[in-house]
Amino acid sequence: MKSILRHCFVMNPKEYAKANEGDDVYLCEYEYDIHWHSFNRPAEIDNGEEDDDGAESDGDWKLSKDPDSDTEEEMDYDEESIKNIIAKPSRAHELAANSQKGRFFGLQKIGVKKIPEHVRCHKQTDLERAKAAFLLASLPKSLPCRDKEMLEITAFIKDAISDDKCVGRCLYIHGVPGTGKTMSVLAVMRNLRTEVDAGSIRPYSFVEINVLKLASPENIYRVIYEALSGHRVSWKKALHLLNEQFSEGKKIGKEDDKPCILLIDELDLLLTRNQSVLYNILDWPTKPHSKLVVIGIANTMDLPEKLLPHISSRMGIERLCFGPYNYQQLQEIVSSRLKGINAFKEQAIEYASRKVAAISGDAGRALEICRRAAEITDY
Ligand code: ATP
Ligand code: MG
């Protein structure tokens, strides 16, 4: 994504087949995995045998299926268009696939434009800096008002990984949207990483999954397996191998002597009809060889109560609630992002904070309102 310089169009397989010669038409065939320093085919992500159990079909991705792939699957798209793409690539497509032939175009040929010096050195105004400071995706340097919760999460993790057996540890974090659940766990993990680097706690592996990003709940097995082993397999195979590792101690990766902290964000979306995915995941930490610590985050307070009894008993009793922020807390959160930036009046921040606190106590919302205000003012 970072290498895209101009407008970019994402096409479905049919449109791709019809794309004009001479266009910059590329089939995204490989993606780079920073963690494992390897290239993977997106096709391999979704080449599992989809089953009867509600897994969604991802026809578009299957299109670029690896011919060497060892799994058979149903293809639910137009066969003619596949032949067009795979058997008779147009000239543009051939060029697009130049990486396969070991040829690369020089940067000039793809229309690189140098960003002029004065634009690069542009000194941001206070409003521009404020807008950047309010971006939700960035993990802020500090998370005010969540010290207590972060201490609890830290204590839970340290306790879980220092226990050599580390059996059956599971923490359930819940709270309404925008109360900093995700950011707090990530901030804790960032702090723990520096402690690992300093050698004061034992190394662990950390797998972070947001269920919203999975095509179907079952895909979580693949993601976990890939994170632990670096290999992509179908979800059924991944489930089998993970079961083997956790129950019998069969090694799947180089790092599996370390405890593994598995963060599952939006955990409630893993609920399937028979609750099997949640059951498996919550069952693993109780297995003798697992060394697995599960942290689940969800909005619903009563998720454990909604589960079948044999599953909710696996969930343990460790729960942490993130309450909605009051207006003073929101004020502090907004102001802390604006340190050193002189763009907002105190009253403006207070006004936005009071409005949001009266409705939801969602910090994300307060930050967005302020960012929008900065945008409008700047405009
Ligand atoms: P959801 O349930 O919607 O996933 P969440 O509880 O996980 O919400 P986050 O995504 O962690 O909420 O937080 C929403 C936004 O608010 C993020 O941009 C985050 O940086 C910001 N935020 C939340 N709490 C704080 C805080 N205490 N200090 C600074 N920023 C915060
Ligand atoms: Mg979240």
Image (cartoon, rainbow, N blue to C red):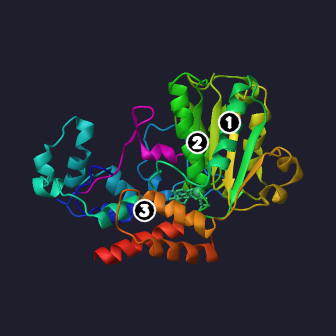
Confirm or deny contact between disc 1 and disc 2 (CB under 8 A).
yes
Seen at 83% across and 48% down, the residue is: 311
Element at badge 1?
helix
Residue under label 1, please give it. Answer: 157
Q: Amino acid at mark 2?
A: Val
Q: Amino acid at mark 1?
A: Ile
**In the image, farthest residue toward the right:** 309
**How many residues crowd mark 2 within 10 Å: few (<14), some (14–19), many (20+)?**
some
> From where the camera sits, is residue 237 visible?
no
**Figure quadrant of residue 242:** top right
Confirm or deny contact between disc 1 and disc 3 (CB under 8 A).
no
Q: Nearer the viewer, residue 220 or 337?
A: 337
Q: What's the magenta region? A: 25-48
Residue under label 3, please give it. Answer: 134
Residue under label 2, please give it. Answer: 188
- How far separated are the C-alphas under marks 1 and 2? 9 Å
- Residue 147's place in the image compared with 361, above or below, is above
Ligand 2 shows up in which quadrant of the image? bottom right
Quadrant in which the C terminus appears: bottom left
- How far separated are the C-alphas under marks 1 and 3? 29 Å
Q: Amino acid at mark 3?
A: Phe
- Residue 9's place in the image compared with 347, above or below, is above
Instruction: Tell me: 159 left or right of 342.
Output: right
Q: Nearer the viewer, residue 286 or 182?
A: 182
Q: In the rendering, at what x and y percent does residue 259 appear?
A: 65, 28
Element at badge 2?
helix
Q: In the rendering, at what x and y percent does residue 127 appear?
A: 31, 67
- Residue 217's place in the image compared with 257, above or below, is below
Q: In the rendering, at what x and y percent does residue 247 appear?
A: 76, 28
**Figure quadrant of residue 177:** bottom right
Q: In the rendering, at what x and y percent does residue 273 appear?
A: 76, 59
- For marks 1 and 2 on the same chain, the one whose residue lies earlier in the sequence: 1
